[in-house]
Amino acid sequence: MTSNETAKHGPGGAGTGAHGAGPDIDQETLLQHEKDTLTHTPVHLMELEAVGKHYGNIIALTEVTMAVDMGRVTCVLGDNGAGKSTLIKIIAGLHQHDEGTFKIMGEERRLGSPREALDAGIAAVYQDLAVVGLMPIWRNFFLGSEITIGRGPFRRLDVKRMKEVTKSELAQMGIDLRDVEQPVGQLSGGERQCVAIARAVHFGAKALILDEPTAALGVKQSGVVLRYILQARDRGLGVIFITHNPHHAYPVGDRFLLLKRGKSIGYYDKKDITLEELTAQMAGGAELAELAHELEAMGGHGELVDQVQAEVAETTGQTPR
Ligand SMILES: Nc1ncnc2c1ncn2[C@@H]1O[C@H](COP(=O)(O)OP(=O)(O)OP(=O)(O)O)[C@@H](O)[C@H]1O
C-alpha cells in the first residue's frame, strides 16, 4: 500500500490481528481492542493523520499518517533529516504538531509535555539514555519513582523490594543480569537499552517509542535489543521503532512508515512489502549507486569509491556494477 492509498483508507489500512498478550495491559482492554480491530472499526492505540510540523519556515514534517496498535511494532524508517525526531517529539509530548490530527485511543490529543505523554501511557527510550553510570541497576530502574516504607520521619527506601522487583522484571523480559547491584555504567549499550525497555514496561507504558536503539550497537548487541522489542510487543505494548536500518526493522516490524525529507514516501503492512523492496526504498539505494558511479567516473579516490560501494551493498543488498 502506498502512502497515498493509506491516506485514502486511513491509518487502519495497515494491518490487523495481534500477538500474545502479557499481563501488563489489562485483558479486557486488549480483548476490546482485538474485537474493534476485527470488526473493522479499529480504535488504534495511537493514530496520526496528515500530521505536520513547521519550525518557522522549515517544514520538518508534513502529511504523515500512521497507526500504532497494542501488540504490534510500527517501524519508522528514514535517513538523516527525514523527520524521525520531529515525529517522536510530537508523540512524546516535547513538540506539538501544527497540522493534522493525533489521536490516542480514538481521542484527539495535543500533548503539552513529556509528563502528559507518560500519563497517557507513552514512554520514550532515547538512544543516549539518561542513566546515572555509577548507580546500581535497581536504583536506575526506580529513579524518580522509588518505593518507600514507613511514614513521616520514618519513611525510607524499600531497597529490598526494589531489588526484587528489578530482578523479576528483568527476568520476565528474559534479561539475565548477574547482579542488580552492578553499576549501570558497566552494562553494554544493548543491555542498557534493555533495562530502559523493562523499566517502561514495569511503569505501565502502553506505547513504547524506541529512538534508534540499535544505531550505536554491533550485530550481536543489536540482535539482543531486537529480541526485547519482540518481548515488549508480546506483552501487549504498541511499539514505535525508529531506525535507519531496514535489516533491523523488517524482522520485528508489523508495519513500516518510510520518511524522506519530512514526507511519507510509503506506509506498508509487512505482507505488502519484502525486505528487498524496503531496503531499495530506504536511504535512496539508487542515489548511492549513482554517487558511486559518479565518483568512479571522476577518477575518484579508490578508498572513497569502495566505501560508498560498501554502503550501497549494505543498504540495498546489491553490489553496484
Ligand atoms: N528545532 C528545530 N528548528 C529548526 N529546524 C529543525 C528543528 N528540528 C529539526 N529541524 C529540521 O527539520 C528537519 C527534520 O529533522 P529531524 O531531526 O526530525 O530529522 P531526523 O530524521 O530525526 O534526522 P536525524 O536522523 O539526523 O536525527 C531537518 O531539516 C531539520 O534540520
Image (cartoon, grey):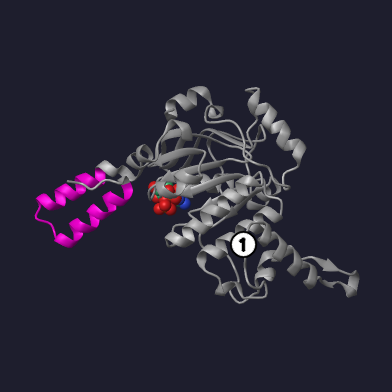
One can see residue 129 in this view: no
- Look at the image and say whether residue 31 sits in the magenta stretch: no
Judge left or right: residue 62 versus residue 143. Answer: left
- Of residues 23 and 245, which is closer to you in this image? 23
Q: In which quarter of the image is residue 43?
A: top right
Q: Is 80 or 167 nearer to us in this picture?
A: 167
Query: Which residue is drawn at the image coordinates 64% and 39% (left, top)?
Result: 70
Verify whether residue 302 appears in magenta: yes
Q: Give residue 1's position: percent from left, percent from top.
A: 44, 27
Q: Residue visible at 71% across and 51% down?
A: 204
> With respect to residue 76, does 15 lie above or below?
above
Residue located 45% across and 34% down the image: 267
Left or right of 271: which side holds 29?
right
- Residue segment shown in magenta: 287-315
* Disc 1 residue: CB within 8 Å of ligand 1: no
The secondary structure type at the circle numbered 1 is loop
- Residue 193 percent across, percent down from the top left: 56, 61
Q: Which amino acid does label 1 sit on?
A: Ile
Residue 102 % position (x, y): 59, 36
Q: Position of residue 85 (x, y in %)?
A: 48, 49
Name the residue tied to disc 1: 175
Residue closest to the eye, 304 or 117: 304
Is residue 200 visible from the viewing direction of this image? Answer: yes
Above/below status of 109 relative to 112: above
Compared with 303, 120 (above or below) is above
Is the residue 312 above or below the residue 218 in the image? above
Name the magenta segment's main secondary structure: helix
Q: How crowded is mark 1: few (under 14 residues within 10 Å), some or many (20 or more)?
A: some
